[in-house]
Amino acid sequence: MTSRLSLRTLFAALIAVSALSACGGGSSAPAETIPADAGLVVKSVKSIRFDASEYSATAGEIKVAFSNEDTVRHTLLVVQDGVKVPDFKLVVPEKGALDVGNINLAAGSYTLICDVPGHQNMKATLTVS
Ligand SMILES: [Cu+2]
């Protein structure tokens, strides 16, 4: 009787724990707010990837917001024809982090990358028009 009861209690506790972790609880700071006037919003998400494979933006000065919904550090750089756009790098060190920066881009096709070692799968196309 006693052992059966404790097993049941243990089971209930396990369910409670898994429900908690499913909610993503445990991150310390609440996610910062993405600016409403951002011209490009990129999120890093679970499994070391961006939240989309293609993004688009309007040529000129673009406010880029980069958020982290993953649990490891990510960066965001813009590359054109194999050359990084200078003086632009956004960094989100942990879950819930947000970095915002401006970049001036002419119309064209660009690649978004994360330069953290081992994250070479993080690639997306940015079409600026
Ligand atoms: Cu990354």
Image (tube, rainbow, N blue to C red):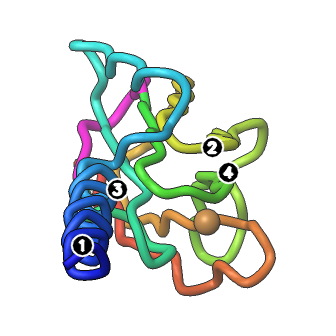
Q: Secondary structure at mark 1?
A: helix
Asked whether residue 103 is in view, the answer is no
Q: Magenta stretch: give its range.
A: 56-63
* Badge 4 amino acid: Val
Residue 103 to residue 79: above or below: above
Task: Name the residue nearer the viewer: 15 or 115.
Answer: 15
Q: Is residue 73 above or below residue 124?
A: above
Q: Of circles 4 and 3, which is in front?
A: 3
Q: Is residue 115 left or right of residue 72?
A: right
Secondary structure mainly formed by the magenta segment: strand
Disc ID at residue 85 = 4
Q: Position of residue 18 (x, y in %)?
A: 29, 64
- Of the image marks 2 and 4, the number of the one nearer the N terminus: 4
In screen coordinates, is 56 left or right of 59?
Answer: left
Q: CA distance from mark 2 to mark 4?
A: 24 Å
Q: Where does label 1 land, which residue?
A: 11
**Residue at x-position 30% and y-position 70%:** 6
